Image (tube, grey):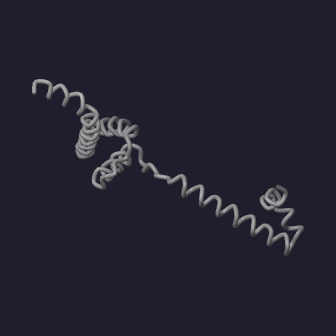
Amino acid sequence: MKYLPLILALLLPSQSCADIDLFRLKALLEICETAKLSSDPGTVNNIASQLQSAERPSNTLLAKKYDECLFTAFGKNKKIINISNLITQISKTADQLEKECRDLLAVAPPVAVANPICKDILLR
């Protein structure tokens, strides 16, 4: 029984660290919101700089506060880009462009060869 607190202390730190990050994030967001209301741009910029290193929260309310703080400080929202979707879109666009260059080559070969984009695609 006297070892129970020691065992709990060894098992709980990993959970506590995760909670501390969430508590710190919430505190930073509240400070930023208060600084915005009191028109304190220095504090808003300081808090926003700290928030940039944190991951955007998945909670919609916290995410909205996060975005508002960054927008107030830097004037633009950090755009979230899904890399796999972007690569898929680039591949589809490249395939479509190659198809259209080949169609142009079939219809008007001199124009296709003179076009610098189609020329690069057709010569590879």
Q: Position of residue 14 (x, y in %)?
A: 28, 34
Can see residue 39?
A: no
Q: Position of residue 98 (x, y in %)?
A: 75, 64
Q: Position of residue 34 (x, y in %)?
A: 23, 43
Q: Nearer the viewer, residue 2 or 24?
A: 2
Q: Quadrant of residue 115?
A: bottom right
**Total tally of numbered discs in the picture:** 0
Vertical position of residue 86 compared to residue 31: above or below? below
Relative side of 58 to 80, left or right = left
Q: Position of residue 41 (x, y in %)?
A: 32, 39
In the displayed orientation, state which residue is furthest to the left: 1
Q: Nearer the viewer, residue 7 or 98?
A: 7
| Residue at image point 36% right, 50% down | 67
In the displayed orientation, state which residue is furthest to the bottom: 107
| Residue at image point 29% right, 38% down | 18
Can see residue 12?
A: yes
| Residue at image point 38% right, 37% down | 49
Q: Quadrant of residue 99?
A: bottom right
Q: Quadrant of the N terminus?
A: top left
Q: Quadrant of residue 35?
A: top left
Q: Quadrant of the C terminus?
A: bottom right
| Residue at image point 24% right, 28% down | 10
Relative side of 5 to 93, left or right = left
